[in-house]
Amino acid sequence: MAAYALKRLLQLIPVLLIVSLIVFFIVQLIPGDPVALMLGEEQRDPEVYQALRQELGLDRPIHMRYIHWLARVLQGDLGQSLRTRRPVFDIVLERYPPTVYLALAALVLGISIAIPAGMMAAVKQNTAYDYSAMLFTLFGISVPNFWFAMLLILWLGIYLGWFPTIGYAAPGTDFLGFLSHLTLPALVLGTDIASTTTRYVRAEMLEQLRLDYVRTARAKGLPPRLVFYKHALKNSLIAAITVVGLQVGRLLGGSTVVETIFGWPGLARLVLDAVYARDYPVLQGAVLLLAVGYVFINLLVDLLYKWLNPRVRLG
Amino acid sequence: MISSGSKGVDMKKYFVAVLFLLMVFSHTAVAQTPKTGGRLIFAMESDVSTMNPFVRMISTDQLIRSLMYETLFDFSLKNTIIPALGESWTISKDGLEYTVKLRSGVKFHNGQEMTAEDVKWSVEYAMDPKNAATGFSLLKPIESITVVEKHRIRFKLKEPTAPFLSTLATVRGFIVVPQNSVPQGAKTVPAYPPGTGPFAFKAWESRVQTVLVRHKDYWQKGLPYLDEVIYKPVEDADVRLSALRAGDVHMIERAPYSYVSKIKSGEIKGIKAVEAKAAGFKRLIFNVLVPPFDNRSLRLAVANAIDKKQYLQGAFWGFGSPVDQRYPAGNPWFVKMPQIKRDVSKVKALLKEAGVGSDFEVELLGQQGDEAEQQVLQQQLASAGIKMKVRLMEYGSYVQKQHERDWQMIIFGGRMQPDPHLLYGVEYICSEVEQAKAKRATRNLAAYCNKEVDELLAEAGRVTDTKKRYEIYAKAIRQITEDVSEVPLGFYPRFYAHSDKVKGFVIDDVGSISGTKFGLIRTWMDK
């Protein structure tokens, strides 16, 4: 398994190179001039404009800029933000923890709802329990995140006053504050994940329950708990893990709406802001580091497959 | 008897009423005595983008900085120039030398005393194009700066410049920081350098908050009242309002228009709205360099198709007032003149005159977020017989297209400058047209040029007598309106909303939240 992990890590190099190439050139293809955006609408003195362009190195040809950027990235330097002039690495790194906390919280919440709910829905198929679980998933899938978020803000934030509606507190400085700020965004994302995953767990569990080995296990008199939990559940989780693995990628870079609504200082919002400001280095750096995160999660998912089903051949 | 009796009753009633009013007022007076201390959490639309106070990025930067930094003079709520870091000024007879006596004993946030050397360094920093400072254009008239003594400084100008005093009164020109506290070359800084303003920078967490604390040695003793001001970036206006209602923040900017009347009527309890009457301005600009709008008749046809009141109704919930020029009625620089009103028969006649038929189609380059405005104009033009296509773009791409002059019409804003020279003398002059033709950045977006107007504006920039200047501007403005290079649509307000625990928050018409005499400097929390 270690050799496999190492091989996968080595594969990261060409993947990231391709990502860097695509990101760099696609980003530059977006129409828009970072200097014009930086200077705003009102002060457009040509002297200032040229000075700033030169200062930011935007007057050089694009391929030179890519080579220069790549050479620096290889030395661990992602460059500086055009807008704030802070090192991109620092900017992205400070957004990683809030993103990961929110993703983890949503994931834990989502999985802890989805697995029991999906499993029970399958075991008690076509009962009131099954129907209510499916109603929940229908709600989670069809209700847009922003609407659910506003609903929670109105209910739990404004009327009941239980949770803050916006902001972030670092867990190291104010853990209770961190948890209370985390609750609402995690509920929104967690519900989203739970509803999709529940359906997968249910479908897969139903599939497993119809297979011969379950019938055999039951026939030889194994208690139902053992049949469900030990045999059927473990096998049905493979499909769920695939879904969850994909969801994590979405959680890391795609929670823009939720981050915007709750004022959560995450990576998705950073990427969006960088697009709007045409802050090329931040955009490139953030996408590159997100790709690293995504590749690692995929690796983790593959290793989990192996653990869940030793028959899966890695490599 | 009866009448005297009734008089007696009236007198009694009168005394009771007076007594009651006195009690109410005395109670109000007691309740309104400012309290020192407290923390105000303020939700703004965007985050800080740079901590270099000379480089302007977005309006949020400007708002936050206005609490930390000051310049030589300031504007009162009535738009008159009042002393700030400069106590008084003298202007030489030829209008070329401005000598400013600086206030002594002013301390920077780091405890260092402010001297004329710091002022000189700050102005020269902003004057260097390498530093990409906001004030670069405004400071162009300066030839040299001399430190006369520790607290006296002299500005020598290249030519008499009427609005120069206004330049010394706006933080957009320059702000005063200690010498060498900002690196040269448009560099970023890890923290805001010390300023002289009522609040000092304490901490910034990206996308989380910016914390400012009271400047203990502030030159206006007893001010500010607040101990801390915390800015939190919250993009969405509805989310900002929810956060205010939930008590997570005490004040928000740009309260959603849809809720303002509910706040004002008290339907949403515990919240007050404060109006910046002329915070925003909109105009429809024509690209006069290319067809179809190189033809004045067609520009006038579009102008006659627009109902400005209905535009404000549709796009700004009925807030705002229609306007035909860059200053609103009531402003000292407002010029009375006949308005171009919606007149469909005139539109038809003008289209005929220009030789275009019923298939006449125009295109508006629109930016995302302004869809409501675009739709209203589209409907108005359509009902007057002009088809309008909207090319909708995200802001960055929109700016690029605008830059490349790949457009016929755009809806644009415009800042109301304290002095008309900074507005008309920059945005309606022929020399800027060359920039436009070369597809370089320009502030004369229409690429409007009228030699007569050019001469008038140049003359108005040199004359120092206000009455005479007004007359020259009036003539120029009437001509600009006649030429229809743009259609001014209206001034619209922006609303700040705050919890009723927040007291003393007064702002000017354009929405500045901090002057030396008003705004957050005099705001306090009623705990």
Image (cartoon, coloured by chain):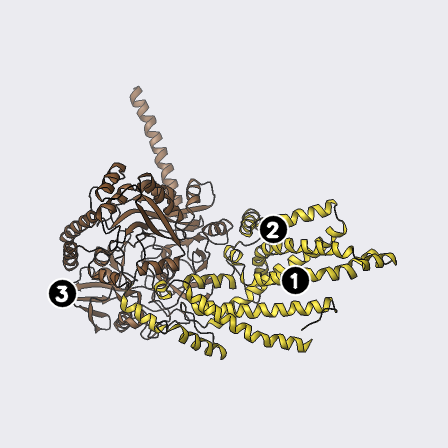
Residue in the foreground of this view, choosing between A213 and A184: A213
- Residue A141 is marked as 2
Percent coordinates x, y for residue B126 in the rendering: 28, 69
Q: Which of marks 2 and 3 is in front?
A: 2
Q: Which of marks 1 and 3 is in front?
A: 1
The reply to whether dot 1 and dot 2 touch (C-beta < 8 Å) is no
Circle 1 is placed at which residue position? A242
Percent coordinates x, y for residue A28 in the rendering: 42, 67
Mark 3, secondary structure of its residue: loop
Q: Is residue B452 left or right of residue B70?
A: left
Q: Quadrant of residue B122?
A: bottom left
Q: Is residue B214 left or right of residue B305?
A: right
Residue B255 to residue A235: above or below: above
Residue B389 to residue B3: above or below: below
Mark 1, secondary structure of its residue: helix
- Shade of chain B as shown in the rendered figure: brown
Residue type at mark 1 is Thr
